[in-house]
Image (cartoon, rainbow, N blue to C red):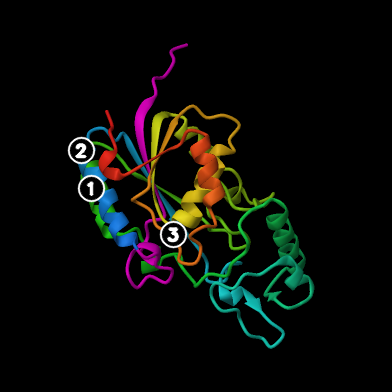
Amino acid sequence: MIKKSRKKNLLLIIDMQHDFAANGGSLYVPGAEEDVLRVAKVIVKHDKAIDHIIFTQDTHHVLDISHPGFWRNEKGESPEPFTEIKSMQVAKGEWIPIEDTGYVLNYLENLEAKGEFPHVVWPEHCLIGSVGHALVPPLVEKAADWARKGRRYEVVQKGINPMTEHFGALRANVPIDDAPETQLNMALVDQLHQFENIIIAGEAKSHCIANTLKQILELEKYSFNLTVLDDCMSPVPGFEKIADPIYQKARDAGVQFIKSKDLILT
């Protein structure tokens, strides 16, 4: 059997969409616009060395478990954005989901038991088909220029299931048994293993980048080198420290954290 040779360099760009990375976006991450420009420079500078580009695209319904409209209190009021909801509050009836209370309670209990991030209600963001859902133009333009030389970039959507949060690129925070779109994305995992080097950038440092790293490190095995461009990501305000344990574990596992100007690809 002829063994396929591995490709070298994959640029994995996480959730660089209008709602996160353009001023005025509903969940704008301060610093993201500058992050975008640095990633765009990486694509131009390393045009010949980058073998493939994958964008992830956060994708949500209006009535999503992490959006205000999914929840009511006893007065019929929805929570303010950035409200944290715990399983105990649902059990006591302090916060009531619009559907399937039994499932939602079990979901929150699993989230807490597995040590995933707390459940936070976000502003409506990355709604399917909206401007906020779109990838930001500077990156699409540079990726299109890169692709015109005989290559194709790829977009992987995540978060489409409204009954579970989906920060990381590989799986939902709590996968649902009968919902393949929430489970470990083996097609993406297999694709990662086709490359020697994976370079990660995107938004937000505190959530989707961190959980993507966490999920990669949870894989039974991986044989690629991981590099994070630490000047190409920024945290959600108020959550600057939430992912510190993940980043420390990543460093301990040999993940490289460098400035984009110091990236060397061959």
Q: Which residues are magenta?
A: 1-30
Which of the marked residues, 3 or 2, is nearer the chain's N terminus?
2
Q: Quick one: label 2, few (<14), some, or many (20+) residues within 10 Å? A: few
Identity, as a three-letter code, of the amino acid under mark 3 = Pro
Q: Is residue 16 magenta?
A: yes
Residue at screen point 69% across, 50% down: 114
Q: Judge by depth and name the residue closer to the eye, 252 or 164.
A: 252
Find residue 260 and report its image quarter. Answer: top left
In the image, what residue type sits under mark 2?
Lys
Question: How far apart are the alpha carbons under marks 3 and 1?
Answer: 21 Å
Q: Quadrant of the C terminus?
A: top left
Taking depth in this image into account, of 183 and 44 the one nearest to the observer is: 44
Q: Is residue 184 left or right of residue 75?
A: left
Residue 149 vertical position relative to residue 113 in the rendered view, above or below:
above
Location of residue 124 in the rendering, given as x and y in whole percent from the top left corner: 49, 72
In the image, residue 94 lies at what x, y percent?
A: 73, 78
Say what amino acid the circle numbered 1 marks: Lys
Q: Which residue is mark 3?
A: 235
Q: Residue at x 54, y 47 (%)?
A: 246
The first of marks 2 and 1 along the sequence is 1
Q: Nearer the viewer, mark 2 or mark 1?
A: 1
Residue hosting label 2: 149
Q: Residue 97 lies in what quarter of the image?
A: bottom right
Taking 3 as reference, is 260 above or below it?
A: below
Label 3 and label 2: CA atoms lie apart by 34 Å
Give the numbered dot on residue 41: 1
Is 265 included in the stretch rendered in magenta?
A: no
